[in-house]
């Protein structure tokens, strides 16, 4: 019998040849053209397709309790996973599907070297130990598939790398060199999309893996590390180890599996909780905090203070997040109004909407805490019509499922009618491509001076990100 719940995803190299497939029962693919979906659309489409895939496989299993034809199962798997690849879903290898076993190219396949992690059940550990991993020659293509760009990393990831190189080597020398993240604390309250306080930063696990493999990839391709002069060269960065913090056990295990897949799980440690709750017995050379500075100002200050206490002298913290939206003239401004309507519905239902803080306030607060802010860059967010349509769709679904006496059926109908009218207005300007609707994301870099003092009370002004040609 074929275990339908174990239908896993083809490697991105094989998926590239499969992305032209069409026509899977019950599936609507918003990203039928490779490369057409980026950022928010990629993440949301991937999530939707995963849900649809699981539902479809459950239907097949229910209809065929005594097993299914392996050829038909294999065909379905390839078609579904090709769509997931286009949508930016994470890859998985062929393990256990159609009765096949993985190639023994994972050093963790040796029982003596296998993962043994407290709190993870034996079946999951066995699965992780059997994952088929990439060889270095395949790594560039695999990471590019995940990032959705020709290079190894997303623009925001690349900006962090470029900023670290410039900070460690301010003289601007062109000789090959690698800036060192050292020990990295990876704090993530979000995944990779651009709504609900999260960002377009991209998948954190694949990015960390790309840093571990960076020198191997550069040497294999016969090149030299760059300083980020353009958007495709390989920035010279390396890393010693990491600690990753996730908000839920579910997200933690999902990302631990990704780390096992990229063969970097045992290079780091994994924690669940919030930065304010957790205790640490060490300090770090670099901290990357995504989506952490949301909520009231005093809470954001406590988080910044806690993260400062976890930095080694001379260490650098990167804050990644989303600013409050600004008003925009014209029909594009309807997007901001739409987000305000959704927040008002959540407040009526008793939920607290995400409260973002502006980069200028963060810059000033970090300087007040004795940190040297040496870079503050804002990234314009340009949602597509699909992004905005998905935002409305998710809001409508949330209303249908909300358990609130205040959000009555008649009130829901008024909210739904208003949101659909706003979406229609936005369609007039967004049908032909992404639009700027008043939203920025930021990456702010600050250093803890080695002498414990500060380099002055100068507050860096935020600049607008300009892609390298």
Image: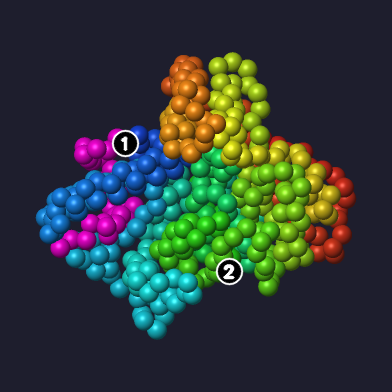
Dot 2, crowdedness within 10 Å: few (<14), some or many (≥20)?
some
Q: Is residue 342 above or below residue 274?
A: above
Residue nearer the viewer, 300 or 107: 300
Q: Residue at x 35, y 34 (%)?
A: 30
Q: Position of residue 368 (x, y in %)?
A: 84, 49
On whether residue 17 falls in the magenta region, the answer is yes
Instruction: Write down the residue under mark 2.
Output: 241
Q: Quadrant of the C terminus?
A: top right
| Residue 310 position in % (x across, y down) | 72, 64
Residue 255 seen in the figure: no
Disc 1 designates what residue?
29
Q: Is residue 332 visible?
A: yes
Magenta residues?
A: 1-28
Residue depicted at x 60% and y 34%: 347
The total number of labels drawn is 2
Residue furthest bottom in the image: 112
* Side (left or right) of 376 relative to 290: right
Quadrant holding the N terminus? bottom left
* Labels 1 and 2: the sequence-earlier one: 1
- Vertical position of residue 93 compared to residue 469: above or below: below
Q: Which mark is residue 330?
A: none
Q: For numbered disc 2, what is the local secondary structure?
A: strand
Residue 144 among magenta residues: no
Identify the secondary structure beneath mark 1.
loop
């Amino acid at each position: 019998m074929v275990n339908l719940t174990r239908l896993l995803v083809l490697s991105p190299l094989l998926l590239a040849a499969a992305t032209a497939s069409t026509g899977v029962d019950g599936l609507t693919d918003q990203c039928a053209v490779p490369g057409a979906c980026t950022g928010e659309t990629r993440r949301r489409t991937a999530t939707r397709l995963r849900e649809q895939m699981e539902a479809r496989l459950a239907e097949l299993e229910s209809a065929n309790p005594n097993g299914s034809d392996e050829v038909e199962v294999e065909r379905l798997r390839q078609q579904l996973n090709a769509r997931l690849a286009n949508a930016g879903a994470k890859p998985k290898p062929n393990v256990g599907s159609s009765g096949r076993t993985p190639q023994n190219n994972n050093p963790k396949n040796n029982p003596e070297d296998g993962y043994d992690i407290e709190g993870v059940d034996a079946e999951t550990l066995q699965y992780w130990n059997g994952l088929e991993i990439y060889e270095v020659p395949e790594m560039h293509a695999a990471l590019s598939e995940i990032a959705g760009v020709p290079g190894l990393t997303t623009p925001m990831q690349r900006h962090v790398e470029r900023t670290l190189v410039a900070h460690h080597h301010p003289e601007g020398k062109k000789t090959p060199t690698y800036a060192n993240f050292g020990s990295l604390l990876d704090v993530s309250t979000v995944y990779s999309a651009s709504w609900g306080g999260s960002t377009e930063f991209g998948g954190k696990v694949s990015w960390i893996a790309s840093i571990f493999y960076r020198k191997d990839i550069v040497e294999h391709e016969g090149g030299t590390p760059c300083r980020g002069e353009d958007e495709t060269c390989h920035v010279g960065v390396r890393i010693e180890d990491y600690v990753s913090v996730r908000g839920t056990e579910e997200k933690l295990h999902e990302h631990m599996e990704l780390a096992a897949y990229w063969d970097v799980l045992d290079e780091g440690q994994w924690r669940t909780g919030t930065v304010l709750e957790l205790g640490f017995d060490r300090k770090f050379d670099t901290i990357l905090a995504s989506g952490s500075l949301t909520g009231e100002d005093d809470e954001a200050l406590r988080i910044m203070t806690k993260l400062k206490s976890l930095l080694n002298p001379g260490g650098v913290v990167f804050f990644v997040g989303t600013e409050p939206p600004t008003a925009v003239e014209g029909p594009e401004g309807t997007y901001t109004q739409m987000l305000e309507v959704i927040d008002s519905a959540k407040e009526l239902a008793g939920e607290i909407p995400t409260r973002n803080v502006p980069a200028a306030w963060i810059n000033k607060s970090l300087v007040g805490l004795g940190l040297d802010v040496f870079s503050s860059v804002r990234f314009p967010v340009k949602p597509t019509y699909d992004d905005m349509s998905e935002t409305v769709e998710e809001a409508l679904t949330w209303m249908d499922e909300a358990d609130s006496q205040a959000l009555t059926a008649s009130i829901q109908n008024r909210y739904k009618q208003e949101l659909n009218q706003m979406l229609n207005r936005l369609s007039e300007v967004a049908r032909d491509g992404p639009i700027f609707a008043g939203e920025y994301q930021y990456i702010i870099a600050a250093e803890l001076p080695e002498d414990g003092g500060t380099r002055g009370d100068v507050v860096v002004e935020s600049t607008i990100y300009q892609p390298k040609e």
